[in-house]
């Protein structure tokens, strides 16, 4: 299958899925994970198109909707030929993630990107495993034909994530707001980062051993971390700014 990678527009002509990391125990198990993953990609990406702010995130979401619409149809056909059932609904975990995006205050760029990054890391493991060891020839071929494109999409979301998580300094933060970013001071405001996302954001800014994270009454995640051998107090505001001070 030929693909064309134009990162600026995030265009892709082939099919890709993002699924949980669990190795499939059987052909039906693979179909279950594939169908749930494909529906999650479409549902979450439709929300991102409406509530994301960065154009590269919107473009990636459109790519997911297009590719997974095709992928879901192909999976449905292959599974039908193999007399396998295709689940129509999300499982509790994926539905919970979709609900979080739907209820979150816009923009949701970082939350969506983080979900996509994890989903695609998991998907590469799943597809490589089934392409190598799958127990159904037709589905194994499907996995083999898909995994390279899946890796391409993983690279795309990795580049977007790097931009979203970059140390902002005097530049625009990854999560754009109407408030002028100030990397020297944390900005109070409603913070939609989860604890896991806050920890990841701080680590991506170059810190390690991030611990004791708690959100204060100003919406700022505060905790402890190390960098260059120093123990630091560290904070993360709703814009994505990371600021640290010596303990």
Image (cartoon, helix red, strand yellow):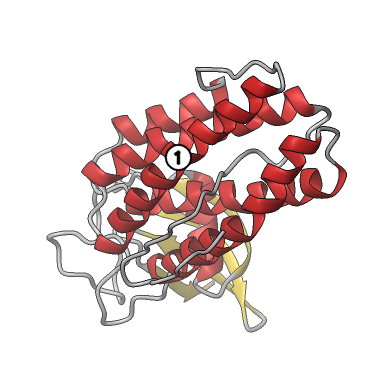
Quadrant where the C terminus sits is: bottom right
Quadrant where the N terminus sits is: bottom right
Residue 35 in the image: above or below residue 228: above
The one of 93 and 21 positioned closer to us in this rendering: 21
Res. 238 visible in picture:
no
Residue 5 in the image: above or below residue 105: below
Q: Position of residue 181 (x, y in %)?
A: 22, 70
Q: Position of residue 204 (x, y in %)?
A: 53, 68
Give me the residue at 46% from left, 74% from top.
245
Q: Position of residue 112 (x, y in %)?
A: 40, 47
Disc 1 designates what residue? Answer: 70
Report the side of 46 relative to 122 (left or right).
left
Q: Examine the image and state in which quarter residue 207 appears.
A: bottom right
Report the side of 79 relative to 213 (left or right).
right
Toward the front, the furthest residue is 81
Q: Position of residue 201 (x, y in %)?
A: 48, 61
Residue 225 in the image: above or below residue 89: below
Give me the residue at 37% from left, 52% from top.
63
Callout 1: 10 Å neighbours few (<14), some, many (20+)? some
Q: Examine the image and state in which quarter residue 44 appears.
A: top left
The one of 45 and 180 positioned closer to us in this rendering: 45
Q: Secondary structure at mark 1?
A: helix
Total numbered labels placed on residues in the image: 1
Report the side of 94 relative to 163 (left or right).
right
The one of 57 and 197 positioned closer to us in this rendering: 57
Residue 206 in the image: above or below residue 192: below
Toward the left, the furthest residue is 178
Res. 83 visible in picture:
yes
Give me the residue at 48% from left, 54% from top.
198
């Amino acid at each position: 299958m030929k693909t064309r990678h134009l990162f600026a527009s995030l265009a892709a002509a082939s099919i890709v899925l993002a699924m949980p990391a669990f190795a499939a125990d059987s052909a039906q198990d693979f179909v279950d994970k594939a169908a749930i993953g494909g529906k999650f990609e479409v549902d979450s990406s439709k929300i991102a198109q409406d509530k994301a702010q960065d154009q590269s995130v919107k473009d990636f979401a459109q790519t997911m909707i297009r590719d997974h619409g095709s992928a879901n149809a192909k999976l449905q056909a292959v599974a039908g030929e193999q007399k396998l059932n295709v689940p129509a609904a999300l499982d509790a975990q994926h539905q919970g993630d979709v609900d979080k995006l739907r209820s979150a205050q816009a923009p949701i760029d970082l939350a969506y990107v983080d979900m996509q990054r994890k989903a695609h890391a998991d998907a590469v493991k799943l597809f490589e495993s089934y392409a190598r060891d799958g127990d159904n020839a037709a589905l194994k071929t499907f996995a083999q034909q898909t995994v390279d494109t899946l890796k391409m999409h993983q690279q795309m979301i990795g580049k977007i994530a790097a931009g979203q998580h970059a140390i902002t300094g005097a530049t625009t933060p990854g999560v754009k707001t109407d408030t002028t970013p100030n990397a020297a001071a944390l900005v109070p405001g409603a913070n939609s980062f989860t604890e896991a996302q806050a920890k990841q954001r701080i680590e991506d800014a170059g810190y390690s051993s991030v611990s004791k994270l708690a959100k204060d009454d100003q919406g700022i995640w505060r905790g402890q971390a190390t960098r260059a051998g120093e123990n630091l107090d560290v904070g993360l505001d709703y814009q994505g700014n990371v600021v640290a001070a010596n303990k």
